């Protein structure tokens, strides 16, 4: 399942993020890469324990908590603190699959990476290349969204970032541990929730909508880890 979430951040928030990132210190992005992905990763990254990462990460986490589409698609139990990267001209990230477990730096917390997320912070017109290419059973999907938009996709997916050929690409990336571990079950719940919300908008809370809503919550109870 791949879900786009438009306008997660407002344009004012994107502007503030870009201002703070412009003044940040950047290091080799391989500091958070695994053994395999580190061989193909060529980008820059803000240290995860710096003040800029913490402030902007809190802003993103707050936006996620208010976003109904994110809540419905992820059924998040834990969200890894958002990280920030930059691809300048000539930089890319080869095909890889994200590590299954991430450790939160400075805390005794582990996050199982059920879902990966990329939040775009640069307008597509400001750079060439830099597409996020996600592979699944239906083929390859190229993603290049407006600044402030987020894409959520299965962390089991093989994916890559194509070389940037002009300008720079800024983004935030992070992972989500879902209450519903099984991807197929999570997809069914997302589709059911969308259908219920559509019906509610058309007919209100009639008996059938109430019944379907009860079915949704009972399935969550059946499949959720917490």
Image: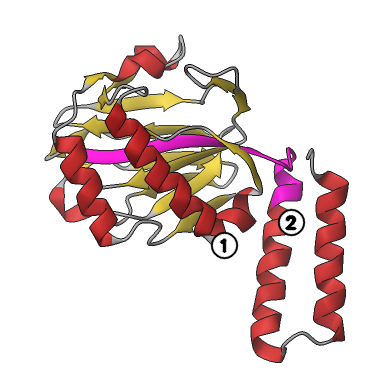
The number of callouts visible is: 2
Q: Is residue 220 visible?
A: yes
Q: Disc number at residue 68?
A: 1
- Does the stretch in magenta take in 183? yes
For marks 1 and 2 on the same chain, the one whose residue lies earlier in the sequence: 1
Dot 1: what SS? helix
Q: Residue at x 42, y 17 (%)?
A: 37
- Does the stretch in magenta take in 70? no
Q: Is residue 16 left or right of residue 157?
A: left
* Residue neighbourhood size for the residue with mark 1, other residues' Cα within 10 Å, grouped as few (<14), some (14–19), many (≥20): few
Dot 2: what SS? helix
The residue stretch that appears in magenta: 169-186
Q: Disc number at residue 37?
A: none
Q: Which residue is mark 2?
A: 188
Residue 178 position, x and y percent, is 66, 40
Q: Residue at x 25, y 60 (%)?
A: 11
**Label 1 to label 2: alpha-carbon separation:** 16 Å
């Amino acid at each position: 399942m791949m879900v786009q979430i438009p306008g997660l951040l407002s344009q004012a928030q994107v502007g503030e993020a870009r201002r703070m990132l412009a003044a940040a210190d950047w290091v080799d992005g391989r500091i958070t890469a695994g053994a395999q992905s580190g061989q193909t990763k060529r980008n820059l990254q803000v240290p995860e324990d710096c003040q800029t990462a913490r402030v902007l990460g809190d802003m993103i986490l707050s936006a996620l908590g208010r976003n109904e589409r994110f809540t419905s698609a992820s059924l998040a139990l834990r969200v890894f603190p958002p990280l920030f990267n930059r691809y300048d001209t000539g930089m890319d990230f080869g095909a890889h699959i994200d590590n299954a477990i991430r450790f939160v730096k400075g805390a005794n917390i582990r996050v199982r990476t059920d879902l990966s997320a990329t939040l775009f912070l640069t307008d597509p017109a400001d750079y060439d290349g830099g597409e996020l290419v996600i592979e699944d059973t239906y083929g390859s999907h190229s993603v290049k969204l407006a600044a402030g938009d987020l894409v959520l996709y299965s962390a089991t997916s093989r994916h890559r970032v194509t070389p940037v050929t002009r300008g720079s690409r800024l983004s935030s990336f992070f992972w989500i541990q879902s209450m519903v571990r099984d991807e197929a079950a999570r997809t069914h719940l997302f589709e059911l929730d969308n259908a219920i919300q559509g019906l509610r908008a058309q007919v209100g809370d009639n008996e059938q909508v109430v019944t379907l809503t009860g079915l949704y919550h009972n399935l969550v109870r059946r499949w959720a880890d917490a």
